Amino acid sequence: MSPDSVIPGSVRSAAELNDQIRALWRRAGGTLSAQERAEYELLVVEWASAIRGEVVEAA
């Protein structure tokens, strides 16, 4: 996954994004390359947005 493939306003759930973050760490063996770090950062930002959206929906 390239950093450019993350779409702002994505409809992926927090759970799906969490799974992708965990898979990235497993593939990387616990040490991220510069490219993996960029992917991780984008996933975390998208995950945080999804969490906020889920909290708003629950309220």
Image: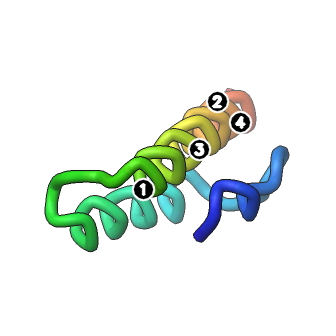
Q: Which mark is nearer the camera, 3 or 1? A: 1
The residue indicated by pointer 2 is: 52
Q: Are marks 4 and 2 in contact (CB under 8 Å)?
A: yes
The residue indicated by pointer 4 is: 53
Check disc 2: other Cα within 10 Å, few if <14, some if 14-19, many if 20+.
few
Residue 29 sits in quarter: bottom left
The residue under label 4 is which amino acid type?
A: Gly
Q: CA distance from mark 1 to mark 4?
A: 25 Å
The residue indicated by pointer 1 is: 36
The residue under label 1 is which amino acid type?
A: Glu
Dot label at residue 42? 3
Which residue shows up at 41% across the image and 48% down it? Answer: 34
Q: Locate residue 31, reporting x and y percent.
A: 19, 52
Q: Secondary structure at mark 1?
A: helix
For residue 43, side relative to residue 19 (left or right): right
Q: Locate residue 59, reporting x and y percent.
A: 69, 26
Chain-order first, disc 3 or disc 1 = 1
Q: Quadrant of the N terminus?
A: bottom right
Q: Secondary structure at mark 4?
A: helix
Q: CA distance from mark 4 to mark 2?
A: 4 Å
Q: Locate residue 58, reporting x and y percent.
A: 66, 35
Chain-order first, disc 1 or disc 2 = 1
The residue under label 3 is which amino acid type?
A: Leu
